[in-house]
Amino acid sequence: MEIKDSINIFEDKIKALKSENEFIIPESLYNEKENLKFESLFALSNSYLGIRGSHEEGTKISLPYFYINGVFDKSETFMRELATLPNPLGIRFYIEKELIGIEDCEILEYLREFDIKNGILWKSLILRDSKGRETKIEGCRFASRKNIHRIGIIYNLTPINYDGIIEVESETDGSIINFADAPRFKVKHTVTLKNEKLSDFAGNYIEVSTRDRNLHIGVGSYIDAFKDGESVLGNRNFNSFGEKSLEFADVKVKAGEKINFVKYIAVYTENDVHKEEIKKYVTKEITDFTEKGFYKEIVDHCLEYSKLWDMADIKIDCDKELNKAIRFNIFHLMSTGSSTNDSINIGAKLLTGEEYGGHTFWDTELFMLPFFSYVFPDIAKNLVRYRFNLLDAAKENAQKNGYKGAQYPWESADDGTEQCPAYTIEPDGSCYRCYVADYEHHVSAAVAYGIYNYTRITGDLEFFYNKGIYILIETARFWASRCEYIEKEDRYEIRKVTGPDEWHEPVDNNVYTNYLARWNLLYVKRKLDELKKDNYSLYSHVLEKTEFSDKEAAKLQAIADKIYLPKMAGRNILEQFEGYFDLKDCIIEKYDENDWPIRPDILKELTVDKTSLIKQADVVMLMYLLENEFSAEEIKDNYHYYEKRTLHGSSLSPAIYSIVGLRTGDKGKAYRYLRRAAFIDLLNLQKNTREGIHAANAGGVWQVIVFGFAGVKTDDKGELIIAPNMPEGWKNLNFKIWHNGKRLSINTYDDNSYKIEEI
């Protein structure tokens, strides 16, 4: 196999691709304690794979995880989680056995820049070793959007004040484990099958398999060095050390002379090709990559991102730092969703970190799906198809728990089984029972709502009547079996349940859950009545396939009519759950420097479940989703009541309070909530960015802008409504959406007027 880059790689040609500052997230000072945060912030994804923003030479504090969307494994853990795969990023430079690295040398200059317009991580260093030798290293890496099996890295190395031989080591590390810095949770999800040369000529190749289901994954790489476009890498040596694959070579250098080091990476799995052909495909991918050339590949990659941004960008005429933060959230969201694969979804941390195991929650339907439905409907379709593909698993889950219909798992991976652990292990080793999966059932209503919302926004009736209607029927059946008739009160209740506020569990009659269950029951009946009138043949087919009957329809109506909805006597305030008003009442009065609520002193005396303080939007979330069921006065009263009692212990909360606050006229606070949401990860406001980007929050930020300040809605008839409510200081807001098959550019203005153009 002959491998060479056909393009003369010049530093200026690559650097010319860097975006303007409004799309750049900088790291201008190296602090090892900040490594894990920046690894999340600077993670690269291309819908197929994701790799964290770790340093190529390695650092003491690092979780250098490499994921492929949909590759899960359980092994000794308590859930199927994204399996971290062999990390192919390793590049190390040595001079006389001394590593030229940020933790091994004096840092004279340091800058990493995350280019969210082009999906490129830039790096620029000047390092001085123990003998005073100074080396400049500049370059970048990307996960190709044009060819999703490829990752490319280039570093331009210049010895500033010395001549000599640079030794370069290219590594693929197959020893990486999940939860590498958490002793109680460490696990190795793969078995190394092959550790060998990519070809007789050069390169590294590691093939592993997941331990539970023996799914094969192959990771290959090849490194070369160029001076003025000509390969100058000396003799290569390949070594395998257990699960590490190393290729070594050297280059003669002179002071002031620039050498371009390029690493080409490719990955395939058994989900892509037959397992016996994985290496062949990896090898061909790298060969094609090198023949095409690094520069052409990265240019094509940038063009693909340009297409994405052409649809997804949000432009605010001022407020530049906020606009950058909004774009940051959009970048990570749109980099993960797949337009080609309906067997995968979007994890709560995208592909940027291991928290929650890459699992799908209600986050997808209520926080992310609206963005994709309006901006990338082809991705949205795969997200709802994912739920349909796992409908049978949801029905099995309901049956296992003693219910009818379909009960979607609180946490879903690749096969639709419940992945939420039954026990939680604390840092001190103690265990306690985790009841989330047992009681937090509102995810099934969220899935149903997602079908409704997707159809309303996209007008995709083909999906609705061929797939979506079956989800709606089976989730309605679940709720009908979940509701308990209380003869004494002549009403239906949902007892022992947990709503969005997870600090109070379990409770009876969480009003959010009861309302959404009722909505699910009534919406199915209404859509079936419409179908019976408009297309009796299809109606009969649906009823025959689901064994649904008029008697069952009447039962759904009867339950919906009598489901209990707790409320404060004589007032508009909904009671979050039965007995909530009997708790010790307390409100939030102080906020920190980031405008985040400070926990009241009462929590030093009482546990939070004994108080009226709540984790996140619960009743207010209900007011957001089912706005038409409440008067403006009811929404306002409930917003003000619960806003004072919400500590926003979940990233899902601030965006919802922003939108609902805006609808109640609390524009100033709505803007403050937007800023909290937009900067949650960039400022590490919840102190857990190290674990990955908050995906639902990213979708929520988009919703605040489009549904909140721009006032966009699609009504149940599919008509577009725009009612801007712009914040003070914004003169113009521009974004794009799809509506009725048309691509629209929308501008809203400071006088709350707007303009729509079809493009």
Image (tube, rainbow, N blue to C red):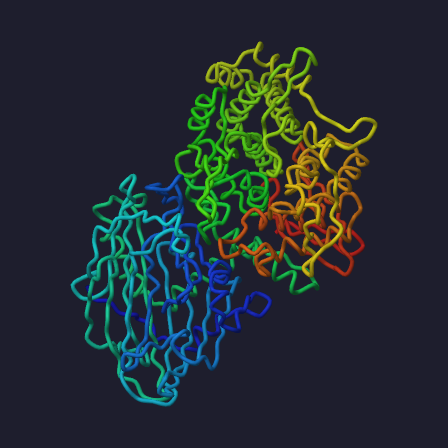
Residue in front for this viewpoint, 113 or 192: 192
Residue 513 in sight: yes
Residue sitting at x 67%, y 51%: 705
Q: Is residue 23 above or below residue 86?
A: below
- Residue 725 percent across, percent down from the top left: 76, 50
Residue 303 in sight: no
Counting every numbered tag in the picture gives 0
Q: Is residue 326 above or below residue 575?
A: below
Q: Is residue 722 above or below residue 182?
A: above
Q: Is residue 133 above or below residue 653?
A: below
- Residue 31 percent across, percent down from the top left: 50, 70
- Dividing the picture into quadrants, the one containing residue 267 is bottom left
Residue sitting at x 43%, y 61%: 301
From this viewpoint, which residue is outermost toward the front? 605
- Residue 684 percent across, percent down from the top left: 57, 58
In the drawing, does residue 678 fall left or right of residue 83? Answer: right
- Dividing the picture into quadrants, the one containing residue 614 is top right
- Residue 611 percent across, percent down from the top left: 69, 39
User: Quadrant location of the N terminus?
Assistant: bottom left
From this viewpoint, which residue is outermost toward the left? 200
In the drawing, does residue 591 fall left or right of residue 429? Answer: right
Residue sitting at x 75%, y 45%: 587
In the drawing, does residue 63 fall left or right of residue 643? Answer: left
